[in-house]
Image: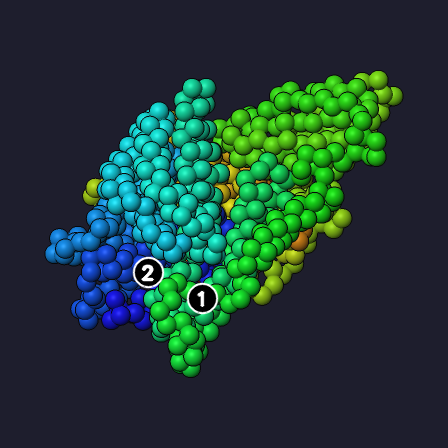
Amino acid sequence: MTKNRGFWPMRDIPTVLWLLLTVAAALAHRALPMPGWLMIHLLLLGAVTHAILVWSQYFSFALLRSAATDMDRRRQSIRLILSNSAAALVIAGVISGLWAITVTGAAALIVAVGWHGATLLARMRGSMPGRFGRTIRYYVASAALLTIGAALGAWLARGDSAPNLVIAHALINVLGWIGLTVAGTVVTLWPTILRTRADEGAATGASRALPVLAGGVVVAATGAALAQLLVVAAGLGVYLAGLGIIFGSLIGAARQKAPRSFAALSVGAALLWWAGAVAVVAVGAVLAALDGSGFPALDALFAQVVPYLAAGFAAQVLVGALSYLVPVVLGGGPAPVRVGTAGFDAAGILRVTVANAALSVCALPVSSLMRVVASIMYLVAMASFLVVMWRAMRAQRRAKAANDPLDARSSGRRGPIVPEGEHAPGRRSGQAVAGVLAVVLVAAGLAAVDPAGLGWSAAPVGAADAPVQTVQVEAANMRFTPNRIEVPVGTRLVVEVTNTDDEQVHDLVFANGIAGGRLAPGEKETIDVGVITGDLDGWCSILGHRQMGMTLQIIATGAEAGSETGGDSKPDAAGHDMGHMGGDTTSDTATAPDLMADPGPGFEPYDAELPALPASAAPVTRELTLTVRDEKRKVAPGVTQTLWTYNGTAPGPLLHGRVGDRFVITLENKGTMGHSIDFHAGSLAPDRPMRTIPPGQSLTYTFTATRAGIWMYHCSTMPMTAHIANGMYGAVIIEPADLPAVDRSYVLVQGEYYLGDHDGGTVDPDRIATRDPDLVTFNGYANQYDHAPLQAAVGERVRVWVLDAGIERPSSFHVIGGQFDTVWAEGAYLLDHSAETGSQALALQPAQGGFVELIFPEKGTYPFVSHLMIDAERGAHGQFAVGK
C-alpha cells in the first residue's frame, strides 16, 4: 500500500471542513434559532459521508490486495467533488425551501454513492480477497441503502414530512449507510487499533452478520414507512442480533488487549452508544404499540435519540477512526508514525471521558440549563480533536522531514513506541478521573444555582425534612390536568409534568421563579416547586397559552388567606428569555405612535398591485413555499414588532389563480414555536394539512380552487388570535369566470396589531382580550399608502380587492370622492357596471372579502379608509394619486 499513502489523507481534508462547519453551527445554535437537522446533516451527510467514501475505498484496496492507479485517483476525486457538492446542494435546498435544488443535490449524491458502490463491487469480483475481503460487501450494501435513503429524503424535502417517513429515512441512512459501513470496518479496524490479532471467528461472523444487519434495516424502515410499530421493533431486534454477532468478535479482541488509546476508547464508546440507542428505540416501539400511544410517541422518542446516534455514535467513531488511520496512512516510517500517533493521543482519555460524561448528563432528566452546559462541554471535548489533529499531523510531517533518528532505535520493533509516561496507568486513570470530575463539578455548581435542575429543592434550609407530595400533571389542549392542586403548608411539592398534546409545545412556570423547560409532545419533566408556604400560581409561558386558560393553581391548605406570590407575578429568568421565547409581554402604551410621521429612509410599502393573470385555456398547477420566520418589521413610524411571518412579510404572499387551478403549498417552520396554515380557498379535511408543525419541520398543503373569491389564509395554531394578530395571514384571489379586464387592480388586506413593546416586542395577548387594537392597517403598515399613494389616471377603471383578515374589526371600505359602480362581495355581484346606481362602501366582517370598481372623474388625491372612523384614525387609511 505504499503507493497509496499520501493520496488518502489529502482526500480527507473536506471531512475536516465539514467538521468545522458542524462546530460553527453548534456554536451559533446557542445564540440563534437554528434547526437541529442542520447540525446533524452537516455531520452525517457532510463529514461522515465524505469519510466513508474516502476510507472504504482505502480499505478495499488493502483487503483486496491491490493498489490505486492514477485512473482510480482521478475517479475518486470526481466522486468526492460530486458527493460534497451534492451535500451542499441538499442542505442549501432545504434551508432555502427550493425543492429543485434539493432534488438536484440528492440526485448527485445518488450518482456519486452508486458509482462508489459499483466500483467496490467490480474491484471485489476482479480480485482474490484475503481472509476479510468479504467485508467489502458491507460497503456495497450500505451504498445501495443510501441511494434509497437519499431518494426518500428528497421526496420528504418537498414538504410531506410525515413522522413515520422521516424515521424510515433516518433508519436507512444512519443504521444502513453509516451503520453497515462501521460494522464492516470495525471487524478489522478494531483489533488493528488495539494492536492485537482479530478473533478467530471474526471473518465468519462478519459474513453471517451482514444479511442480518441489512435485513434488520430494511424491515425496520419498511415498518416505519407503513407506521407499523411492531414491525419497526422486530427489524431493530434483528439488527441488534446482527450487532451481537459483530460485537462478539470485538469483545474477543479486547480481551487480548484492553483499549487504551484515544482511538480505541473513542471507537469503543461509539459502539456502545450505537447499540444502546437502537435498543432504546426498539423498546420504545414495543411500548408505544402496547400502551396505544402509537407512532407519535415513537416519533417523540426517536427525536430524542437521534442526537445521541449522531453525537455519541457517528461523531465518536469518526474522530476515533481518523485518530488511528491518519498517522498510519500519512506514513514516513515507524518513528514519524509514532510521533503522529502520540500527537493524536494528547489528553485522549480526558477528551473521551468529558465527551461521554457530558453526553450522559444530556440524556438524563435534568434542567434545560444543565443540558445546555453539558452539551457545550461535549462540544469543546469533541472540537478539540481538530486542534489535536492539526498539531499531530504537523509534528509527524516535521519528523518525516527530519528523518527522526528514533527510526534506527525502533528497527525491528512492532507497534508504536509511546513517549515515556504518556500511557502509564497512573496518567490514564488520572485523566479519566479528571474528566469525570470536570463534569460532576460543573453539574454540582449548576445545582447550587439551579437546584431544580437535579431535582433538588429550592426551598429554605430545613426543607429536606419536609414531607414530599408528588403530583402527575398532563399538559394538553391548552389545559393542565389537574389544574388545581391542594398541598398542605410546609409540604415540598414535586410536579411531574407530561406533554400529552399531539402537536403543541408547552412548559410550566411558577410565580416563585421555579420554571421547567419546553416540552415537545411526548416529553416529560420533573419540577421541584419547593416547600409550599402559601397559594401559588403556575402557567404555560408560551405566548397566548396563559390567556387561553393554560394555568394551574396550587392551594396551600391550612394557610392564612392570600397567596405566596400574586397571580400576576412573572417568573424570573430561570433560563427563560420571555420576550424571545414568546412569554407574556406588556404593551408600551406610554407614547402613542405618530401615524403621520415620515416612515424614514429605507421605507418600502407593501406592493398592493395585482398583475393580470396570463391567458390560459386550462387549469394550471401553482407551487409556492411559505417559510415561517420570526422577523422584526416596522408596522408604523417608530414602531417595530417581532412578527411571525410567511416569507418575511405581513400579510404573507398573495396567491392568485382561477377556478380549477391546483395549488401545492410547502409550509416550512423556521420560527421558534409551532405554526400551521389554513387556506379558506381549499375545501378539504383539515386534520393533516392544517396540523401544527414544530420548528424545523415542513408539510405540503395541496388544494384545488373550486370556487371564486378573495379568500383568507392564516395560521390556525392556538391561540389563533395571537398568531393572526402577529402577522400570520394573507389572501388568495380566485377570479370569477369571465372577469373583465381593468386598467389597474389593487389588493388591500385589513389587519390589526395589539402592540407589545414598540422596539421589537411581540403581540400582547392581554391587549387582544380588550378587543381594542392599537393599529388597524391595510397590508400591514399603518397609513403606508399616505406615504406611498396608489397610482391611477383619470378615466381608468380601477378594481380594488379588499379582504378583512380581522381578528376583530369589521371593515367598511370607502374611497373619499369616489363612487363604486361595481360591487362584488363574498361571491355575489351587488352591482355590476351599473350606470344609474352606485355604492359608497364595501361592508365586510372578519374573514370576508370582495372587490369594488370605480372610475376617477378628475385629477387629484382621493383618500381611502375603513369608514369605521376610529379604525381610519388607527391606520386604516391611504390615498389614490390620480393623474391625467
Give, as a three-letter code, the residue at label 2.
Asn
Pinpoint residue 7: horizontal percent, then vertical percent: 29, 69
- The answer to whether residue 259 of the structure is visible from this angle is yes
Which one is in front, 298 or 121? Answer: 121
- The answer to whether residue 763 of the structure is visible from this angle is no
In this rendering, the answer to whether 302 lies above or below 157 is above
Q: Secondary structure at mark 1?
A: loop
Which one is in front, 394 or 884? Answer: 394
Residue 254: numbered disc? none
Pinpoint residue 736: horizontal percent, then vertical percent: 32, 37
Give, as a three-letter code, the residue at label 1.
Ile
Pinpoint residue 116: horizontal percent, then vertical percent: 22, 56
Among numbered discs 1 and 2, the one appearing first in the sequence: 2
Q: Residues within 10 Å of mark 2 (few under 14, many from 20)?
A: many
In this rendering, the answer to whether 578 lies above or below 345 is above
Kindly identify the residue that appears in the image at 27 percent across and 57 percent down.
59
Kindly identify the residue that appears in the image at 56 percent across and 26 percent down.
476
Q: In which image quadrant can residue 165 be found?
A: top left
Residue 84: numbered disc? 2
Q: In which image quadrant can residue 157 be found?
A: top left
Camera-nearest label, 1 or 2: 1
Q: Report the label total.
A: 2
Kindly identify the residue that appears in the image at 39 percent across and 75 percent down.
407
Pinpoint residue 599: horizontal percent, then vertical percent: 60, 60
Does residue 491 appear left or right of residue 102 in this picture? right
Q: Secondary structure at mark 2?
A: helix
Quadrant where the N terminus sits is bottom left
Q: Residues within 10 Å of mark 1 (few under 14, many from 20)?
A: some
Which residue, given by chain and number where applicable, does mark 1 sit on? Answer: 417
The CA distance from mark 1 to mark 2 is 37 Å
Kindly identify the residue that appears in the image at 13 percent across and 53 percent down.
125
